[in-house]
Amino acid sequence: MPRTKTIELTKNSRSFTFELCHRNLDFGEGNHGEYYWMDGRHFRRSSGGQNLRACIDFWWACVEEAEDSEDVANQLNLVLAECYPLVNTSRAMQSVFLDAHLHIKADRKISLETGSQGKTEKIVERTYNLPDEEYSRIRSIVDSRNILEIQNELIRLFSGVQPSGKDLPKFQEALRHWTGNGIVAFRKGGMQLLHEYVDGDLKKQITKYRKGGVDENVRLFLNLFSYESKVAFYLCYANAWAFILPILEDEHGLNEQSIRFMKMWHHQNQPLLFEGRIHQIFSGQVLSLHPLSALVLTDPSTLSVINKWVGHPDYQQLIDSNNEATSKEYWDVVLTILVAANEYKQSHQRWEESRINKEIISSPTVENATNTDRNHSVAKYLEAYVAEQGLFCQGCSGFLKYKDHEVNENLCPVIFQCQTCDNIRKINVDYANFKDHFFNSTNEEDS
């Protein structure tokens, strides 16, 4: 059970209070540490909780102290971060970048235990088993020491729908309009007027577009805007940890390995310039706030690998000289993170396929069908169904693969992605027609 601790930061004669959770970490081979974090569940609930407000306000106090409050980039980040509580409950953001937390029962074994209260479910720890060929593929990516290849792997795993090249200018203009109005409000009336704009006009716009019945590009813009707001808040979050960690080290006696680990885990990688293009290795994410973190923190072998890096005798020298990439131990940590990312993605896909099974097969049109083989992947049948209907990529006529779906009463809007050019196509699948295809397909395979 995690313990809690309150930390207070001071900036510009103001105090900012943070509520932290903490627990012991076993790094293996007799090495122990302490891990502190903020309860991310609150960040995904309406107002976002006390820590969200403290992160944004403290970050802006740091900006003011550095006399950078007139910088447009900082004002833009402020506007976006202030918008995050308006969109933080949206699941639609997952279509832009996958960071949905796993269901409590995903990839867990469940047993029934008989006790004084009768039979109760007991859920054991998750178990993951990445195929050997997948591990070898990931290993080869890391062995290449190519940052762009590593980034491309993360994009492949998590990145979703993006605007087409011809639509991008319209998206950028809409973003400038929403955030520009926020910047103007801030320059005219400070935080008070900015909050009035965000909680007034902008909230109305977002609510209007969320209700549905709008153009697909409008929904995509709202999802992209929501994700940009999340990333802006994550910058504020990472900034707070840069000041919290020294206090934990100086006043609460945390050891060196713990501090080094949390510097890495609560850090937001900033954009870097590669071959004339701006890249952010993890799309603005923070490892501690991404669900793959749970896979790392609950795996003793992974924590042991991390300890060999954060406990490296030359760690500080390598960090200070930007030469960490010369260390084998550093790349071993990169490997463990990529493996955890792949395990998370596969677990998420398995759970989603199970969810699709329950939603589609348990729909009113098929609820009486009791002989269905539930182990078949509905995603596979959806792909076969649209192919047999002559529905392919509208750009290159390539085959479509399933990405996501919504559930309505009679139609199931399904989002597909081209297997060749990655273009997105949304198709309304009729329950009755798909039911016939599904059962015909399962019967053919069983015969």
Image (cartoon, rainbow, N blue to C red):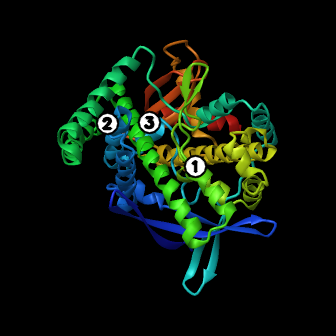
Q: Residues within 10 Å of mark 2 (few under 14, many from 20)?
A: few
Which residue sits at x=55%, y=13%?
397
Q: Please name which of the two marks, 3 or 1, marks the residue nearer to the observer.
A: 1
Q: Is residue 52 left or right of residue 397?
A: left
Mark 3: which amino acid? Tyr
In front here: 432 or 227? 227
Q: Residues within 10 Å of mark 3 (few under 14, many from 20)?
A: many
Give the Cα separation between the discs numbered 2 and 3.
55 Å
Residue 49: x, y in percent? 36, 60
Residue corresponding to mark 3: 431
Which residue sits at x=61%, y=32%?
156
Q: Secondary structure at mark 2?
A: loop
Q: Please name which of the two marks, 2 or 1, marks the residue nearer to the observer.
A: 2
Rendered image: mark on residue 70: 2
Q: Secondary structure at mark 1?
A: helix
Residue corresponding to mark 1: 287
Q: Earlier in the sequence, mark 2 or mark 3?
A: 2
Residue 248: x, y in percent? 55, 66
In front here: 267 or 25? 267
The image shows residue 25, relative to residue 326, as above or below, that is below
Give the Cα separation between the discs numbered 2 and 1.
30 Å
Q: Where, by quadrant of the figure, is residue 47 drawn?
A: bottom left
Q: Secondary structure at mark 3?
A: helix
